[in-house]
């Protein structure tokens, strides 16, 4: 199926943009500023505590919530805690000695976040074991209050029902015997995870509603969590969550396996709330949220001394037809939404491909160690589109990038919308066997997508089932990601850098672009290989002036260099570029691309069945001619 790109000019009001940008600064702040935006009543939550528990029962509860009118619930956090400033709240820390499952010496441990400051929305947390659940009540004895001794003494003994502002899971991720953070759930439906050797960067969400739509975004909330007690030899942990909002209620199951690529298998069943379905204009599945201030493709550095500042540098897509696309991120002048229509996508994600420290020069932030996230759909997702939302940001404190899948059709209110996907958190360099310390600007990891982690196999699912009934029989019987399929990879060449600008001395009226492609197959091709060309497509608003391609002798990448002449209309210009070659060069690249790589792809406008037709097309690569994925970029005049 042809992948159709369209640009949506958002009519988002300035006030809505400000609200969204402020929300994106912190997932926790999102939940606090929407203090009334939840509908799970205290009575309902109490009734579920201490009783039978399964994913099926959680779905029933979500269905019942969606059938009833949404009701706001006031914050359970007392005023003195909400009055805390940042420093005083930060001085309240969870006592590691109180970690759940520490005394049993289990492979995972649970810790909790203290309410207060901007964290005015709390969640209830339960432990699930043997098909039953017990609530873990708030207790001030779980925390070290630092200098807040008077505050600790003032907390009443009946604060057990207050709940926590979030939770985190720890496991020996990097060093045997040392428990590191693996995943954090805090604020609205936000969560973020770490693969081995990474620093926290982009976040994920359970659901996105009406992102960048007129009238503002709705932020669903994870109201309750159930953490399955892991078995002594468990290699994954299972966490369930109940989601609610004015428009949607849902049941979630996260099966999280740590490793060089930490994989979360996500199963969800959603129900549109009766009477509110018309207000759900855009429903975003598997949403990812990141930050892009400026990069090598940005015309401005804002006076900052660092070369680049971003958590992610591009959106990658693997379409249902087999085409690979790379969309460099941007910090636009106005809110911008791009939609990539597809059917049954094979994957998409926000990636940090640049792993060179020299690209950022930030010792504290360590942007070169921020993870990438790849969404691998499971089953038939049908027709829909991957949306990319880019929001202007004046600095690096705002999460201004959102990507998600939105289905073409939604079920009626009360009818289930079920979906499943694997969310891979990974460091590109680690996945390719290249350390981040040695990967250079033109010598980045040859494989930007994670290999399957052997730790996440069918035995892990059995461990999770043994861990205490937090997983139902169907989930326990479902193998994790490595047991089912390895991540598909782009063809032999992939985009590793995008640069734009103009020459002050030669053809100053032209806009110039350099797109660098790397990959083992490309690196082995001789600089004088015959028949290699850059195929450049320029949309309305400009004309292609000239284009060429050459091998960089200093880092063995290939550079497509081209220039366009804008028409002065001010319209955004859609650009596409890929490398293709004569059959001999393509065969050479394929044979040297390495295990798991391929030099074939269905190009723009091609389908799996019609790939041969694409080979004869002048505006798309044929299956035997394509050397790279397709670079897709929107340039603003």
Image (cartoon, rainbow, N blue to C red):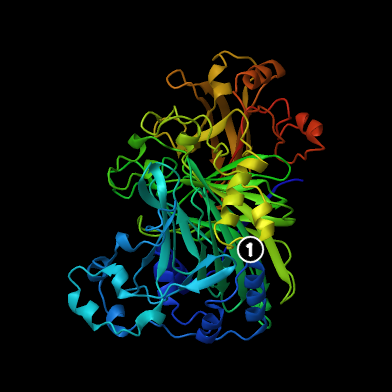
- Residue 25 position (above or below residue 526): below
Decide: few, some or many residues near mark 1? Use Cα within 10 Å; few <14, some 14-19, many ≥20.
many
- Residue 561 position (above or below residue 7): above
Residue 622: quadrant of the picture: top right
Residue in front for this viewpoint, 570 or 229: 229
What is the tally of numbered marks visible in this picture? 1
Residue 419: quadrant of the picture: bottom right
Q: Give the percent coordinates (x, y) of residue 144.
A: 25, 67
Give SS at disc 1: strand
Residue in front for this viewpoint, 102 or 276: 102
In the picture, measured across the screen, residue 603 lies left or right of residue 558, that is right
In the picture, measured across the screen, residue 195 lies left or right of residue 148, that is right
Q: Residue at x 53, y 86 (%)?
A: 43
Q: Give the percent coordinates (x, y) of residue 502.
A: 44, 37
Q: Residue at x 33, y 84 (%)?
A: 78
In the picture, measured across the screen, residue 336 lies left or right of residue 473, that is left
- Residue 219 visible? The answer is no
- Residue 438 visible? The answer is yes
- Residue 282 position (above or below residue 443): below
Q: Which residue is mark 1?
A: 268
Q: Give the percent coordinates (x, y) of residue 2.
A: 74, 45
Q: Give the percent coordinates (x, y) of residue 475.
A: 65, 56
- Residue 611 position (above or below residue 210): above
């Amino acid at each position: 199926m042809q992948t159709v790109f369209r640009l949506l000019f958002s009519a988002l009001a300035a006030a809505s943009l400000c609200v969204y940008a402020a929300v994106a600064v912190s997932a926790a702040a999102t939940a606090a500023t929407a203090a009334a935006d939840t509908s799970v009543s205290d009575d309902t939550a109490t009734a579920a505590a201490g009783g039978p528990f399964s994913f099926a029962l959680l779905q029933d509860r979500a269905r019942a919530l969606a059938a009833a009118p949404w009701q706001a619930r006031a914050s359970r956090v007392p005023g003195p805690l909400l009055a805390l400033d940042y420093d005083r709240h930060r001085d309240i820390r969870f006592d590691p000695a109180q970690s759940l499952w520490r005394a049993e010496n289990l492979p995972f441990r649970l810790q909790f976040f203290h309410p207060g400051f901007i964290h005015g929305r709390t969640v209830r947390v339960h432990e699930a074991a043997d098909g039953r659940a017990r609530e873990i009540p708030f207790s001030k004895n779980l925390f070290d209050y630092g200098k807040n001794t008077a505050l600790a003494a003032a907390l009443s003994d009946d604060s057990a029902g207050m709940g926590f502002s979030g939770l985190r899971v720890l496991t020996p991720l990097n060093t045997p015997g040392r428990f590191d953070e693996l995943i954090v759930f805090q604020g609205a439906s936000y969560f973020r995870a770490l693969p081995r050797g990474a620093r926290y960067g982009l976040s994920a969400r359970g659901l996105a509603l009406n992102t960048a739509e007129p009238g503002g975004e709705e932020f669903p909330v994870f109201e309750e969590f159930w953490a399955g007690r892991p078995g002594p030899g468990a290699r994954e942990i299972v966490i369930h969550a109940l989601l609610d909002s004015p428009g949607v209620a849902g049941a979630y199951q996260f099966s999280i396996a740590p490793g060089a690529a930490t994989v979360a298998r996500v199963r969800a069943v959603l129900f549109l709330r009766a009477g509110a379905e018309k207000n759900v204009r855009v429903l975003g599945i598997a949403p990812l949220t990141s930050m892009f201030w400026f990069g090598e493709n940005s015309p401005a550095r804002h006076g900052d001394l660092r070369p680049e500042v971003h958590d992610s540098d591009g959106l990658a897509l693997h379409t249902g037809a087999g085409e690979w696309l790379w969309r460099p991120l941007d910090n636009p002048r106005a809110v911008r939404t791009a939609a990539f229509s597809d059917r049954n996508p094979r994957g998409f994600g926000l990636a940090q491909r640049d792993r060179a420290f020299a690209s950022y020069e930030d010792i504290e932030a360590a942007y070169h160690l921020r993870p990438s996230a790849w969404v691998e759909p499971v089953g038939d997702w049908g027709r829909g589109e991957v949306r990319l939302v880019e929001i202007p940001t004046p600095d690096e404190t705002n999460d201004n990038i959102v990507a998600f899948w939105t289905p073409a059709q939604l079920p009626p209110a009360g009818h289930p919308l079920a979906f499943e996907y694997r969310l891979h958190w990974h460091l590109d360099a680690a996945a390719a066997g290249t350390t981040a310390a040695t990967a250079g600007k033109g010598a980045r990891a040859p494989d930007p997508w994670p290999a399957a982690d052997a730790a996440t196999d069918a035995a892990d699912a059995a461990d999770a089932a043994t861990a205490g009934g937090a997983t139902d029989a169907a989930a326990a019987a479902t193998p994790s990601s490595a047991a089912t399929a390895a991540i598909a990879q782009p063809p032999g060449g992939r985009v590793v850098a995008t640069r734009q600008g103009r020459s002050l001395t030669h053809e100053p009226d032209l806009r110039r672009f350099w797109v660098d492609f790397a990959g083992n197959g490309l690196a082995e091709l001789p600089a004088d290989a015959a028949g290699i060309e850059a195929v450049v497509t320029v949309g309305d608003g400009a004309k292609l002036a000239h284009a060429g391609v050459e091998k960089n002798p200093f880092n063995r990448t290939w550079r497509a260099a081209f220039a366009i002449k804008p028409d002065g209309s001010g319209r955004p210009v859609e650009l596409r570029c890929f490398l293709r070659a004569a059959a001999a060069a393509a065969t050479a690249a394929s044979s040297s691309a390495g295990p798991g790589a391929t030099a074939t792809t269905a190009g723009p406008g091609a389908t799996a069945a019609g790939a041969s037709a694409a080979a004869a097309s002048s505006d798309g690569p044929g299956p035997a001619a394509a050397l790279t994925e397709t670079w897709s970029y929107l340039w603003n005049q």
